[in-house]
Amino acid sequence: MEVSSKQFIPVLTGLGPVLTGLGPVLTGLGPVLTGLGPVLTGLGSVLTGLGSVLTGLGSVLTGLGSVLTGLGSVLTGLGPVLTGLGSVLTGLGSVLTGLGSVLTGLGSVLTGLGSVLTGLGSVLTGLGSVLTGLGPVLTGLGPVLTGLGPVLTGLGSVLTGLGSVLTGLGSNNKFFLNISEYCRRSLLNNLSQFSQDSAQFSQDSAQFSQDSAQFSQDSAQFSQDSAQFSQDSAQFSQDSAQFSQDSAQFSQDSAQFSQDSAQFSQDSAQFSQDSAQFSQDSAQFSQDSAQFSQDSAQFSQDSAQFSQDSAQFSQDSAQITSLITPA
């Protein structure tokens, strides 16, 4: 079977569009490959920036851990500080309460001392009255003794001249009676005042003894309150020392917390800077990806046209092949 050259005309005619369509495909492939470069470069920058972001995030989280650990230490240290402060305030309350008891007891002691001194004044006043009353008694006793001298002198004369004495006894009887009456009245008056003053003195002495007993009781209570006050003051000093120690530890933990917080702020700032760079790289990557998608769409359109032309070329070639192949 002879094959005419005219039969190749459809094949060659169909090959023309195929080759013509291959040109735009190859031309479109260039921008696709060219656009793929910035996309891959941008993707590298994005991944690099993402690495920096994740590294910075690790530093931030590590710093946050240190901050939270330091905050825990601060809060833990704050507990003993507050507890110690409570003990100090409680001890201070006990000290002030004890001081109030001491001052109250001191007031009772001073009041009792005033009563004792007042009673002692009354006793001394009564003793003065007794001694003053005793003076007239002794003074009245003087004339009695003075009058007794002439009596004894006269008694000698009586014994010397008993007759004359017996004769003059009637005339001297009135003299002795007057002396005896004077002495009796003087002694009765002075002894009555002396008894009255002595009774007042006994009463004042009893009151003095009662005030002295109360004073001794108040003094004993004062000593007991003073001992309790000393014990509370010692406990207060011990609690204050513990409070100072806990406060020092709290200050140290707070300083460490401040240092960790400063490091955390620095890491956060670096993280923000890396995140901003990551966002910028991601934006560029998105822009390059959009351009790549646009070039890829054009390439797909050109490839579809090329496939359509190639299919037509394949169909024409098959037709020619069937004609030139012997039956």
Image (cartoon, rainbow, N blue to C red):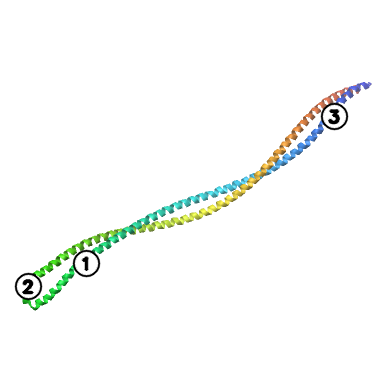
Position of 210 compared to 155: left or right? right
**What residue is at 10 percent from the left and 77 percent from the top?**
157
Q: Which residue lies under the disc numbered 2? A: 169
User: Is tag 1's residue or tag 2's residue first in the polypeptide sequence?
Assistant: 1
Secondary structure at badge 2 equals helix
Secondary structure at badge 1 equals helix
Q: Nearer the viewer, mark 1 or mark 3?
A: 1
The numbered disc on residue 160 is: none
In the rendered image, residue 323, in percent from the top left (x then y), is placed at: 90, 21
User: Is tag 2's residue or tag 3's residue first in the polypeptide sequence?
Assistant: 3
In the rendered image, residue 194, in percent from the top left (x then y), is placed at: 21, 63
Q: Which residue lies under the disc numbered 3? A: 23
Q: Which residue lies under the disc numbered 1? A: 135
Secondary structure at badge 3 equals helix
Q: CA distance from mark 1 to mark 3?
A: 161 Å
Q: Quadrant of the C terminus?
A: top right
Q: CA distance from mark 2 to mark 3?
A: 195 Å
Task: Say which amino acid is labelled 3.
Answer: Gly
Q: Are marks 1 and 2 in contact (CB under 8 Å)?
A: no
Query: Mark 1 Cα within 10 Å, few/some/many (few <14, many 20+)?
Result: some
